[in-house]
Image: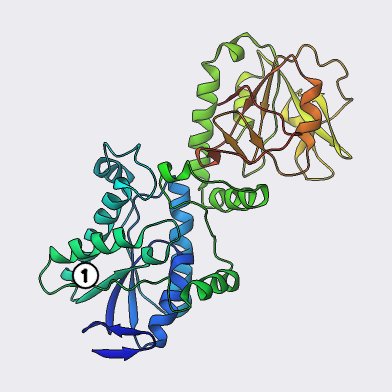
């Protein structure tokens, strides 16, 4: 046994496999281990995390931190479908309930198997530092996983104690870690409550890991769903937007329907959006404030022919609430179109269970 501050370290712990759930939960634990002469190998196995973009952001933060410390990180790959099969029948369980225990068992069994096959005698998990989860469930799952392999020990230390929780918060600030407000799965997401600033920052980071191919594929799916709606089929005059890189892509969709639909685009004038008729991509000029292509010509004064408005946003929820970029442009424009159906366009990762709103935010009629 090796003595270390506030802790008896298990035999063989000079080489520890550390199952890691996210960088915020890992920082203080990794620092403590290294100060105690332990060099952990980080094992990233979190198929529970949803959506894929969220998973990639969290894994990226763990990888960045591991590289900065010269530590090895093992990627167990992402198989959310297998995780859903594992917790089948427990979807409606409350947080900290039976679903969570089954989730821990799956992830820690994977860590235990890797540890056993690669010469580790001790493994543990940063799940023990999470404020979202029950420590007793993590210990139960870890001990069970260790029992499946001969000669393996689960280090069941409470990683919230001994000043580590306070150090955890400090490292998050020092490293500027992406810090989420839900455990990871779509069911825990239902309990998430963001403020507007945090929600915007989180969505920005999540969209940032999307590839151009992912954006194109998801954009195509959005427009295919819109094309199936009665309101799109019946509308001849549609207000839409010319997309920025972090928004559902519109140019190809507009060009596809330009010959049979009349499209309008917003144009920024000071703190206001005005509406201009779209007459072709060659007639677009770069906007002065944000560099977004805008139509030339005069603003349209009569908006009554417009029966459908397609609105971008940072996030939407099932109730139709929208979170914008914080400038209030659409919240001032949409009241001028009370007769038009309002449809929110977003990537899958921008759909939240609840969007923080106030009295100035305009609801959508549906989210595409």
Above-or-below relation of 29 to 272: below
* Residue visible at 43% across and 50% down in the picture: 184
Q: Which residue is mark 1?
A: 115
Image-based side of 105 in relation to 199, left or right: left
Above-or-below relation of 180 to 50: below
Image quarter hosting the C terminus? top right
Front residue of 191/78: it is 191
Image-based side of 355 in relation to 27, left or right: right
Callout count: 1
Image-based side of 133 in relation to 271, left or right: left
Image quarter hosting the N terminus? bottom left
For the residue labelled by badge 1, is the local secondary structure a helix, a strand or a loop?
Answer: helix
* Residue visible at 50% across and 48% down in the picture: 211
Residue 362 in sight in this render: yes
Rendering coords of residue 130 (x, y %): 43, 62
Q: Which residue is at the far top? A: 234
User: Which image quarter: residue 31?
Assistant: bottom left
Rendering coords of residue 16 (x, y %): 28, 77
* Residue visible at 39% across and 72% down in the picture: 159
Q: What colouring does the structure picture have?
A: rainbow
Q: Dot 1: within a 10 Å radius of its alpha carbon, few (fewer than 14), some, or many (20 or more) residues?
A: many
Rendering coords of residue 13 (x, y %): 26, 82
Above-or-below relation of 286 to 61: above
Image-based side of 49 in relation to 119, left or right: right
Front residue of 150/281: it is 150
User: Which image quarter: residue 258?
Assistant: top right
Rendering coords of residue 10 (x, y %): 24, 82
* Residue visible at 48% across and 69% down in the picture: 64
Residue 283 in sight in this render: no
């Amino acid at each position: 046994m090796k003595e270390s501050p506030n802790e008896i370290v298990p035999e063989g712990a000079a080489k520890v496999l550390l199952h890691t759930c996210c960088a915020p939960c890992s920082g203080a634990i990794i620092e403590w281990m290294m100060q105690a002469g332990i060099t952990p190998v980080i094992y990233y196995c979190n198929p529970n995390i949803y959506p894929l973009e969220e998973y990639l952001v969290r894994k990226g933060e763990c990888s960045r931190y591991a590289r900065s410390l010269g530590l090895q990180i093992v990627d167990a790959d992402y198989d959310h479908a297998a995780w859903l099969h594992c917790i089948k029948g427990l979807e409606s369980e409350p947080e900290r309930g039976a679903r969570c225990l089954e989730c821990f068992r799956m992830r820690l069994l994977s860590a235990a198997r890797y540890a056993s096959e690669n010469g580790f005698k001790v493994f543990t998990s940063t799940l023990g530092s999470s404020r979202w989860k029950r420590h007793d469930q993590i210990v139960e799952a870890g001990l069970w996983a260790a029992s499946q392999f001969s000669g393996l020990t689960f280090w069941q230390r409470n990683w919230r104690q001994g000043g580590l929780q306070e150090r955890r918060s400090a490292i998050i600030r020092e490293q500027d870690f992406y810090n989420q407000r839900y455990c990871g799965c779509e069911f825990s997401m239902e309990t998430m409550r963001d403020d507007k600033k945090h929600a915007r920052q989180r969505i920005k980071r999540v969209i940032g890991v999307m590839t151009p191919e992912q954006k194109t594929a998801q954009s195509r799916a959005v427009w295919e769903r819109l094309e199936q709606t009665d309101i799109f089929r019946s509308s001849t005059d549609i207000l839409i937007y010319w997309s920025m890189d972090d928004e559902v892509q519109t140019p190809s969709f507009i060009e596809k329907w330009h010959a049979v639909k009349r499209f309008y685009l917003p144009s920024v004038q000071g703190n206001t959006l005005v509406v201009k008729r779209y007459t072709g991509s060659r007639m677009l000029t770069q906007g002065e404030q944000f560099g977004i292509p805008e139509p030339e010509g005069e603003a349209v004064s009569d908006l009554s022919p417009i029966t459908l408005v397609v609105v971008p946003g940072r996030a939407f929820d099932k109730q139709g609430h929208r979170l914008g970029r914080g400038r209030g442009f659409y919240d001032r424009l949409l009241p001028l179109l009370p007769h038009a159906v309002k449809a929110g366009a977003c990537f899958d990762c921008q759909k939240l269970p609840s969007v923080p709103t106030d009295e100035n935010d305009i609801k959508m009629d549906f989210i595409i």
